[in-house]
């Protein structure tokens, strides 16, 4: 608990058996009430290992539903068990769970309802091994998104993020895409509905076992991000009526 607020960590997992134990070991269980892991039809022993480690709730998809579909299962389960603060941590150990207390504090004290752990603030991204083409694409997409949605973030593409219960109940995240663009649709919804977002500097690590998408899927993701930002602007102008902003 954080001041009577239930803290839940959610982990979207796919073939994470090699890094899950290391990630889970850094989750501060004196602060975190429950951990939920959703295994999106992995081909390894992710689910079995999660149960062995003592993860409180292990959801196993019988078929792969995509990164967005994975998160939908996680957030719905977190709301179901009464979470007040929900923090998403990838079990691939690319982001350290040691930032959980800081992110929890910002939401728990009522400072901001959303916190993003940014790889771009400071010099953590390139220092941690982010490929140069991904760094350049990140900077270009973020600048374009800031312009189109009239907000200012250092990056929209981090997978390490925390939300208050109020935010998850307000936005219709279940209407979002099941693929990687889900993350950007979610941030677009949050900004659209007027929630403020905080950012904290986050070190990151790129290594063989860490999850990553290839160039083709990265390109598809980039085009999807631009589409989301354009639709955000058109909805604000009243020229479109997308279901994700209900």
Image (cartoon, rainbow, N blue to C red):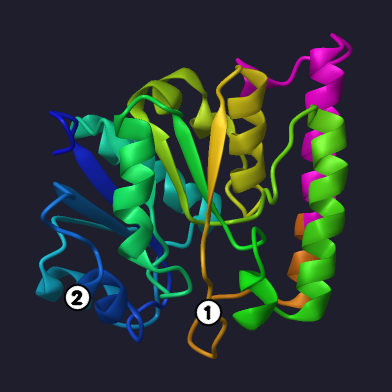
Residue at figure coordinates x 69%, y 77% from the top left? 126
Which quarter of the figure has residue 185? Answer: top right
Main SS class of the magenta portion in the image: helix
Q: Quadrant of the C terminus?
A: top right
Viewer-side residue, 48 vs 53: 53
Q: Which residue has dot 2 on it?
A: 48
Q: Which residue has dot 1 on it?
A: 205
Q: Badges 2 and 1: C-beta atoms under 8 Å apart?
A: no
In the image, farthest residue toward the front: 122
Instruction: Based on the picture, tell me whether residue 60 belongs to the magenta stretch.
Output: no
Of the numbered discs 2 and 1, the one sitting upstream in the chain is 2
- Segment colored magenta: 222-246
Answer yes or no: is residue 229 visible: yes
Find residue 124 and report its horizontal and vertical position in percent: 61, 71
Viewer-side residue, 67 vs 5: 5
Q: Quadrant of the N terminus?
A: top left
Q: Nearer the viewer, mark 2 or mark 1?
A: 1
């Amino acid at each position: 608990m954080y001041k009577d607020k239930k803290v839940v960590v959610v982990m979207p997992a796919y073939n994470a058996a090699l890094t899950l134990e290391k990630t889970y070991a850094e989750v501060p269980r004196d602060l975190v009430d429950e951990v939920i892991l959703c295994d999106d039809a992995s081909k390894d022993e992710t689910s079995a290992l999660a149960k062995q480690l003592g993860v409180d709730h292990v959801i196993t998809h019988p078929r792969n539903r995509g990164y967005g579909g994975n998160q939908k299962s996680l957030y719905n389960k977190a709301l179901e068990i009464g979470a007040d603060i929900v923090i998403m941590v990838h079990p691939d150990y690319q982001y350290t769970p040691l930032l959980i207390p800081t992110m929890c504090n910002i939401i728990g004290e009522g400072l901001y309802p959303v916190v993003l752990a940014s790889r771009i603030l400071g010099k953590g991204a390139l220092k941690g091994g982010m490929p140069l083409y991904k760094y350049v694409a990140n900077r270009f997409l973020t600048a374009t998104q800031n312009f189109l949605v009239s907000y200012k973030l250092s990056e929209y593409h981090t997978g390490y993020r925390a939300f208050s219960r109020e935010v998850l109940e307000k936005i219709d995240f279940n209407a979002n895409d099941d693929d990687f663009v889900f993350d950007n649709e979610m941030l677009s919804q949050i900004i659209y509905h007027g929630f403020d977002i905080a950012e904290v500097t986050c070190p990151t690590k790129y290594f063989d076992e860490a999850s990553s998408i290839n160039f083709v899927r990265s390109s598809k993701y980039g085009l999807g991000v631009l589409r989301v930002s354009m639709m955000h602007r058109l909805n604000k102008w009243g020229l479109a009526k997308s279901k994700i902003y209900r």
